[in-house]
Amino acid sequence: MNIEKVFAVTRRRWIGAFTQYALVPEARAALQKAGGAVESTACSSSGWLKSAQKRAGILTAVLACTLTMLTGCRGVSEDEQASHEISPQQLFMFSPLTDPAPATGVAVLRVNLGRRLYYDRHLSENASISCNSCHDLANYGVDPGKAVSTGHNKLPGGRNSPTVYNAGLQFVQFWDGRAATLAAQASGPMMNPVEMGMSGPDAVLAYIHSNPAYMRQFKEAYPALKDPVVMDNVTDAIAAFEDGLLTPARWDKYLAGNVNALSNEEKKGLRVYLDAGCAACHAGKGLGGNSYQKLGVYRDWPDQQKDPGRFTLTSEARDRMYFKVPLLRNVDRTGPWFHDGHVQTIQEAVRLMGEYQTGRKLSDADVNLIVSFLHSLTGDIPQQYIQAPSDTASAPEAGDRHGRWHKIHHAMQSSAQEGE
Amino acid sequence: MRWIIWICGLLIVGLLAMQFRRPNYDLAPVNATATFDARVHPGSGIGNTLHQSCYSCHSAQGEIPWYGHVWPASELMQNDVRAGRARLDFSNWSNLSPEMSRIRLLDACRAMRESEMPLWYYRPMHPGSAPKPAEVDAFCAWAQSQPSGQEVAFLR
């Protein structure tokens, strides 16, 4: 056992606990102001001592220094003293996102087809909404400002619309992970009576059969198939398009070695993020999207009856209040937050996470630092990639479309019956 | 002298009263197919190291000792188990993607390398819980070999 390391860890915990729960908030503010991060306090740093004495009295300062001395000043490493620099050892749980490689061959055709389907409002029962209606690509893939989106019949959805950007990084889709892949996810809203409300795959395929341009695109994108207009290809094309919705950010440049990609404020925020334990769940390439976690670890999350998470899906007690951990990429642009969209500010979202998930009452200063760091996760919207095809930007009258569909659908059924 | 007796008496009564505060270790029935052993198949060597060093706090499969039901030890232990399972739960490994599975294992490696885990006050009460350096090395090498994710040079 390395006793120095044990002491260093213990010292960090004691001082962290002390500064976290100190009864004198002024002393805490003084410590943070002086060091940026509480771990960087050392016996030699007299500046913060004076400040703490001024603001909170000598007792607080003596207690802080005593704790530090008790557990050994030698345990403070270089990177800990430089409060805004993060050692690479602390970043091993992250990996950078790079720009997607340009698609080639039929992949391009599938992406183009998927883009067109994504924007097509004809894929809803009354031709009023498309995928983009609730996952607005111009607004970071969410329905901005809405706790839950409204479907084709103006009924509210059950959960907040998650961003579609970087969704391909997730290990499962939907808040409860009920779809294993983007393609499996894509058909869900189309058939959901509250969302797009299509009566079934036949209705979707009937519409596509009615559109010569689509027929041509499907044949080109899936040339090996005799009948490429099948539901699996509809969802495959949408998934191919969504796979390219990636938003590398300054954070990725930082991970790749550019230490200037983050401001000092953001680096301080990263340190608080790591020390607070946020990375226990929000790690990996997407900073989330790679595990299920219980919402409400240290305190019971309110309103559990309304939405118990994966329990709705599995009926297993161990899944009660478990949700897929959302991605943090672009999180400052994807509000309102949480599965029910009840939180209106990102500061409040961070504060709640501290309280419910890590058992810490984060100070306003810590919350703001973490939010600063979260800003560095926001990438640019790929404007060229998301440009909607001109012929899917508007929908025709629902009555016209329905009349055509039903004729075609009826004709397809008749021919199938004749074939039998 | 009498006031000392009063204070001691009050403390004892308070201590006894606190025993009615029962701990909740959230030991829900374990789904055998969701455990770390079932999902990752670590082999007996790695598996034994983890069972011995980690499972008390990091799973629903640990045994709670008698003092874990006596306040104030129960309060401390309950908090440790809750915090431990929030960060690493060997009973619910199916909740993790391969990427997060590897991250959790590498973090466990880091914590053991830095003697952060098992907790210093846990070790005297559980002799033999602290893994030997060779066991830590074997575990880290195995964790590093798990699929997905980036290469982590510093752990080699």
Image (cartoon, coloured by chain):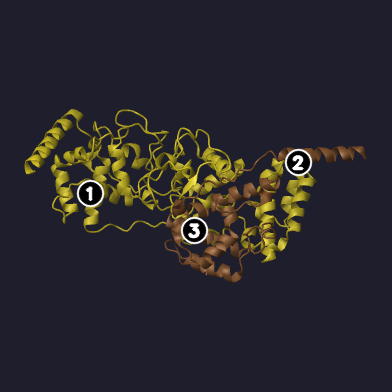
Residue located beneath label 2 in the image? B15
- The residue closer to the viewer here, A223 or A334, is A223
- For label 3, the residue is B103
Callout 1 and callout 3 share a chain = no
Residue B152 seen in the figure: no
Per the rendering, the mark at residue A233 is 1
Determine crowd level at label 2: few under 14, some 14-19, many 20+ residues with C-alpha closer than 10 A: some
Question: How packed is label 3: few (under 14 Cα within 10 Å), some, or many (20 or more)?
Answer: many
| Residue A75 screen position, x and y as percent | 68, 62
Badge 2 amino acid? Leu
Among the chains pictured, the one given yellow colouring is: A
Q: Colour of chain B?
A: brown
The verdict on a common chain for dots 1 and 2 is no
Asked if the residue under mark 2 is in contact with the one under mark 1, i.e. CB atoms within 8 Å, the reply is: no
Is B39 rendered above or below residue A113? below
The residue at the point 24 percent across, 39 percent down is A120
Task: Please state, as top left, top right, bottom left or bottom right, where the C terminus of chain A lies in the image.
Answer: top left
> What's the CA distance linking mark 3 and mark 2?
42 Å
Specify the amino acid type for callout 3: Ile
Q: Nearer the viewer, mark 1 or mark 2?
A: 2
Q: In the rendered view, would you say A275 is above or below A303?
A: below
What's the CA distance linking mark 1 and mark 2?
67 Å
